[in-house]
Image: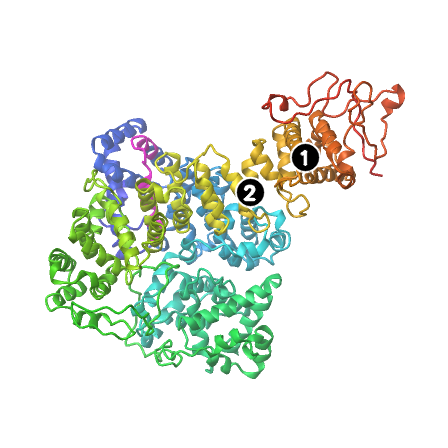
Amino acid sequence: MVQQMSNPGFSTSQLLFSVPPVDDLDDLAERLEKNFNLVVSIQSGSSQKEARDKLSQAATQNVDKYADFLDGLLYGILTDPVSADRYLGDMTVLSMLNADAFAPVVKTLNILLQDKFSKLSDTTKKQAVWLLKGMTKSGIANLDRAHIPFMRNLTGGENWKNIALLESYMEIFAENRSYFETPASVPIVQMAVLTFIQLIQYHSPLQFSVIKDKEMDFCLDLLRTRFVDLSLAGRELTRSLMAVCKMPKMKEFWNDLVNNPKNLPLTAGGLPQFLLSKSPRWLFAHRISTELEVKVNFMLSKVRAPVVNRYSDIFIKQYLSTPESELILPELIRFVIRAVHPSNEILGSDVLQRWNFILFLLQNCKTSQGLNNCMLALFYDWILFDGVENNIMNIEPATLLLMNVRGNSIRVLGKPLFVTLIDYLCKIALEFHPPTQVKTRKSVLDAIQYAVEKRVIPSFIPILEAVPEEARTALRKAFPEFFGEDPTAQRLVDRTNTNGANGNGKPLPPSPAPQKPSGDLDEFPMDTSSLSDPDEEVALPAKASVAKRRPKTPTLGKRSRSSEQPSLAQCVGMMAPSLQPLFVEMAEGTDDEKCQAMENFVMEVINEGQNYDMDDCELLARTLALTIKPIYDRFALPENLTDESFEDSVQSPLFILFRRVWEESEDSPQRHRALNLLAEMTECLPDIGFYLVYYVLFRKTKVIQDEDRDALADLEALCFAVRRKNQTTDEDAQTQYEEFVANCMDRCGRQDHRMVVHIAKFLYREAPRVTKDSPLFAHAVISHIDAWELRALWNLVLQRRLVMFSDKACANVVRETVKWETIEQTFFWKLFHAHELKTDSWIIELLKVVDFKKHPEAAIQVFESLKDTIPREEVFREVLRREPDDADDHTFSTLAMQWCINDSPANVAEMFAKIIAKLVQKKRQANKHSSPAKEELSLEHVLGHITAIQSFVAENDRSGGKKARDGGFTQMLYHASMQLALAKAKESASPSVREKFREVFSLVAEEEPEEEEDEVKPIATKKVKKSSSEEKTGKKRPAAGKSTSSRPGSSRLSSDEEDEPRLTRPKKHRNKSPPTVDTE
C-alpha cells in the first residue's frame, strides 16, 4: 500500500473517498496521507514492538507533531482494513503519552463524518464503524462528536441500503451497554432511536424485512430500558413514533405510552405529559444529512424567487426522485421551521421564503400518507402551542402558506392544496389526541391569534373567506369560534392592522413566477448559512410602532417629540456635526475603523462630557445602540477558544466602552457618564449586561491579569444605573441585582448556548451572593443547556470547581423547580445530586409544595432520596402529612415499604411509636386547656396511614401472596413498639375515633390483666383462627416481630430526652399470636 501511495499517478483521495482521481482536490485527504507517510517512514524496517517504540520516542521528542502522528494512524485505519489492528494498537500506545490523547482523532473523525460523509468510500465507512466500536469499548470521551454525525448521514443517499454497515453499527450498542448508560451518552442514544425509527420506514419493502425486524428490536429495547433518557428528546420523538406506531411490534409500546403510562417510567401524565417536553435544539439540525442541510440553507439564503426553478429541478433530481425520498420530506419541513430562521434582511428581500420552499416540498408528495406526515410536520407547532414560550418563526411558515395558496389553483394529489390544508387542520385539532381535544383546539386558536398579533398577517378573515362551502362544515365543527359571536373569536378574526405582513394591510403576494434559466447548473455553491437560535425571537419585516418615551429636552441636537422613535438615519441627523462621522464609520467602516471611531467617541463624549448634558443622553444612547447593534446580533463564542481568539473576540466598539468603565476609578465622572450611557442603551440593546459579563470574564483570565480588581463591581454599578433610569432605586437592591444577573445569564444562553458553561462558572465564583442558591439564576443556566453542557457542568461540580447550591439555602431552589419543564428538572437534579449535600432540609421544603399528581418529576426525586433508609423524625413527620385518603397518592405507604425492606421493620415501628407517643401526650395536654392549639399532624392522620398499610396487607392476603411480599408490613404492625403505641392511642382516643379506626385498634394483641390495673384490654373485633399446632398443644405461637426473650419494644424511645413521652411496657405481658384476619 505504501508503494501504491508513493506512485505519482495515484490519487490522494482514491483510498478515502469514492471519487474519480480527476476530482482529487481535498486538502484533508492530502494532509492525512502526508501524516501517514510520516508514520510509515519512522516505523519502516522495524519489528512491531520496535516500530511502536520509535513512534513513541518521536512523539515525545516532537510534541507539535503528536496530532499529526494520530492523524496518520487514523488514515491507515480507515484505508487499510488488514493492518487496522496494528495501527489502532499504535494509537493506543501513543494515547498513554497524553491525558486527552484521542481528542485529535475524534476531531478529525468528526470532520470526515460530518462534512465529507457522502464522499467516503464504502471501505472507509466500514472502517469508521470498526474504529467507533473499538473506541467505544475503550471508553473514549466525547465520542458523541463522531457517533451523531455518523447516524445523521445514514438516511442520506444510498446509505440506508448498506445493510452490513447498519448491522455492524447496531452491534456497538449491544456490546457496550455500560458506555451508553452514562449522562454524556444520552444524546447518542436519543439520536440512535430517532435515526433507526426513520430507517425502519425506509426498510418497509418486503426484501428488507430481516433488517427491519432487527431495527425494530433495537429501538424497542432502547425505548423500554432507556425511556427516562429518551423522554428528554421530547415531542419530536413522539412525532417519529407516530409514523411507525401501527407496525405490529411497535403497537404494544405505543399502547403503553397512550393508554397505560404506568408501564413506563417518568410518564405519570402519559402522552400529554410527554408532549409538553420540548425537544433539544440540536435535534432539529441533525434530522437531515449534512449535504442536504447545506443545500437547503443555500436555497433559503441565496436563491432569488424569480430564478428558483433552475435550482428546484436540480434539488428534485438529487434528493426527491426516488420512491423512498418521500420519507425525508417531513424532516425537511421540521428543519426549515425550527432550524432555519432568516434575518429581517432576507425576510424583506426577494430571496426564496420558507413558506414557498415548503410549498415546493408538499407538491413533491407522492402518496396521501406522505402528504399527511408532511402536514403534521407543518402544523405540529400549532397543535402544541403553549402560550408561554412562543416563537413566531415556528408559526409563520404555515400561516403564510395558507394566506398565499388560498384562492389559487395549486393542487396536490388531484385536490386543491388550500382545501386539503384546512381539512387536515380541522381533523388534527379534533383527532390528534381525543382526551386533550379542548387543549389542542385552544392551542391552534392561540397560534392563529399570536400570528395576527405579531403581524405575520394583517387578519385571519381573508383565509376564512377563501374556504369553499364544502370545507366550511368541517371548519365550523372544529372551530365554531370563527362563526359565533364570542368576543375572543371576534378579536381573533377581526383584528386588522394596516401595518401587516407587507406593510399595506394586504396579504403577501405569491413569489414572482420563475424565469427560464440562462444555462445549465451542474452543482450548488457549497456555502452554508449559519443557523439562528430556534428559540430566538426574530421580528418580521413590518413597520412596528414604538412605545412613547418620556419627553426630554434634547441637547445634542434637535429631536422630534412625536410618539414614534426616530430611525437610525434620523438619529444621526440630530447629532452634533462632530459626532455624525463617527457613527457613519461605526456603521460602515472596517473592524479597525469601527474601533477607532468608538475610541474617538469615548474621547469626545465620555472624557470631555462637559460639552454635553449627560443627564439627558437618551437620544445619544439610542443612536449608538442602533449603530452597533448589527455587530452583536450574531455574537458568538470563538470556535477554538484560545487566549488569542478570546482577545480577538473583544476587539469591537462596545467593548471599548466597557474598557473605559473598567479602567476609571469608582468615583470618576467619566465612569458615571459611561454607565449612564450604557443604562440608556439597554432599551435598544438589552444584551449589554451579558456583554459586560463577557468582557469582565476576559479581564479576569490569564490574558490580562487584574487580580486586585473587584470582578463584578462594574456589573453592579450598571444595574444601579438601570434602576435609577427606571426609577426603581427604592426597591430591594439585592433582589433587583439578582434579577439583573439572572437576566444576563439568560441573554447569554439565547445568544450562544456554548457560552453558558464559561459564564455560569465565572458568575457562580465571582458573585455567589446573587447566584448560589438563586432559583432565577439556576433556571437561567439550566434552561439553555443541552446534554453536552450538562456534562461539562456536572464535571465541574464533581471536581469542586463549581458550587451552585449549599446546605444552608438549597431549599429555595428546590421549591421553585416544580414549575420548570421536565427536561429542566431532569438536568437540575443531575447537578443538584452531584453536590452531595449533607442536609435533607430541601426534602421537607419539597414535600410542602409538591403535588404528586401535577409534579411527577419532583415526586420521583422524593422517592429516590428517601427510599434507602428511614429518615430523621422531622422528615418522617412531613411525609406523614400526605393525605392518607388520597387514592392517587401512595407516597407514605410506598416509602414505608421501602424502609421496611431496606432498613428494618423494627426501626419503622419504633419511629411510628415515637411520633404516636408525642401526639398522645400533646393531646392529653391540650385537653387540659380551654383553647387547644391546632396541630398540623394529628393522631387521626397517623392512624389513617396505618389503615392504608393495613388495607395493603389485607389485599395481599386476599390475592394469595406470601407475607414476604408485603415488604415487612406485618412485622412492623405487630412489633412490640407499635403494639404499645396503638394501645396508648386507643386508650386516649374518643369513642368516635375508636369506632372509625376499629380495624387499626384490632391489631393490638390481647392482654390478660394480672397485676397492673391500667393494662390495656384487648378488643376482639375479628374472628381469630388457631393454627393446627395450637389446637394440639393448647399453646399459642409468639406474635410476629416479638421473641420469647424480653427485648424492650421501645428501645429507641428509652434513649430520648427525659421530657419526651414514653410508652411503658405492661408487666407480665404474655406473648400472644397476632390476630389473623378471616378473609373468607
Q: Residue at x 46, y 49 (%)?
A: 824
Q: Which residue is mark 2?
A: 847
**Quadrant location of residue 928?**
top right
Front residue of 162 and 639? 639
Q: Which residues are magenta?
A: 91-115
Give residue 371's position: percent from left, percent from top: 51, 69
Q: Which residue is mark 1?
A: 928
Front residue of 286 and 562? 562
Q: Is residue 799 above or below residue 516?
A: above
Q: Main secondary structure of the magenta part?
A: helix
Could you tell me if residue 630 is visible in this image? yes
Front residue of 392 and 872? 872
Please name the amino acid that badge 2 sits on.
Leu
Q: Quadrant of the C terminus?
A: top right
Please name the amino acid that badge 1 sits on.
Lys
- Local secondary structure at mark 1: loop
